Image (cartoon, rainbow, N blue to C red):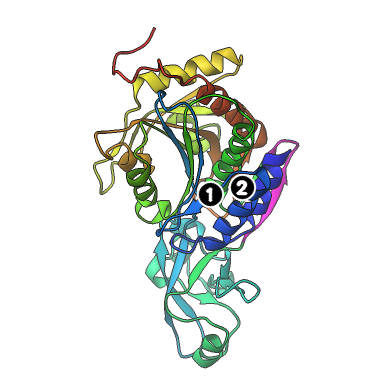
Amino acid sequence: MAIRDDLETLMLIPGLSGHEERVAAAIRARLDRIGLTHRTDRLGNVIATVDGDPRAPSVMLFTHMDQLGFIARKVTHDGYVKVERMGGVPERALAGQAVLICVGEGRDVPAIITNKAHHATTPEEKYQVVRAPDLVIDAGFASRTEAEAAGVTIGVPIVYQPRVMALGEHRIAGTSVDDRAGCAVQLAVAEALAGRTNGPTIHLVFSVQEEFNLRGAVVAAQSLRPDIAIQIDLMLASDTPDMAERGEMHLGGGPGISLYSFHGRGTLNGVIPHPALVALMEQSAEALSMPLQRSAQVGVLTDLSYVQLVGEGVASVDVGFPMRYSHSALECADMRDLEALAELLTEALGRIGPDFALSRERRA
């Protein structure tokens, strides 16, 4: 399947927030093969517009290209690297992880987040999580001079070592499933749109810096001024023992729609979706005889939270795919959900015509 091929390709390309250009280049090349013209704005967002009926509401369909990781803050005299986190990196999942120091394509440096030898840890240390400021990365250098000669200096981006794993027949695990899976789905939608003969104007945006400050897509929205914004991102899967009380979102159960999101930690923002778009997704899923899973979560925030506030307001909805183990070095999704999500979005976009009303009245 093209979605799986695109996803595996993109998962293996490093692209920390603010350093997405390698991912962007791969996406631009894919859009070229699809036959869609595109542009890249000053912030780095890749935008492809499919012109349509000017009487219909315009749509911005978007997903983010970047991933979380680290920024080098210090290279010690003996060649170790100290870092700052970029995005919501989980401290308890870091010790002993393989990482990649991204000094330049073809020159990247593999490294390890150190973990004190088990034989030497005290009983108290065995149950402690190393805090991010105390993390140390070992890339095999013997000195600062040696590290700097390899291009490892303050400010260099660092990501989890890119990898892809097949889990069973349908599932895929690895780095940056969040949100290279969204990029792969959006590319599948782009391919479907390239041959269409009617429908609304659709702006396909592959956005930057979502994991940093959730505002990369805002720059694109300010330029495009869409009437509708649809964000593709993960939905927290709740089908593992540790997540069972968080909801009813299951891998392999179909795409999802968010009915409520609120960050709840350090920022007062989230998304309550526009009722016309909730109805659109529900009706599209019904027409496809497709299950549509539902999510309502605190602790989740996407850049749609800010896109919805552009101009006079943008009718917005978050849709996505169930994903396990978010922000860890090995996230997990089900290819069947991604394929169904692409079908759902293609169907929904085709239902937006000149008579599509954006009133707040809930549709029957």
User: Could you say whether the residue bearing mark 1 is in a helix, strand or loop?
Assistant: loop
Which residue is identified by label 1? 38
CB within 8 Å, label 1 to label 2: yes
Residue extending farthest top: 364
Residue 4 horizontal/vertical position (percent): 69, 42
Residue 270 horizontal/vertical position (percent): 31, 37
Which residue is identified by label 2? 31
Tell me the kind of residue under disc 1: His
**Disc on the earlier residue, 1 or 2:** 2
Residue 214 visible: no
Q: Which residues are magenta?
A: 162-171
Q: Nearer the viewer, residue 249 or 33?
A: 33
- Quarter of the image containing the C terminus? top left
The magenta stretch spans residue 297: no
The magenta stretch spans residue 163: yes
Residue 348 horizontal/vertical position (percent): 51, 23
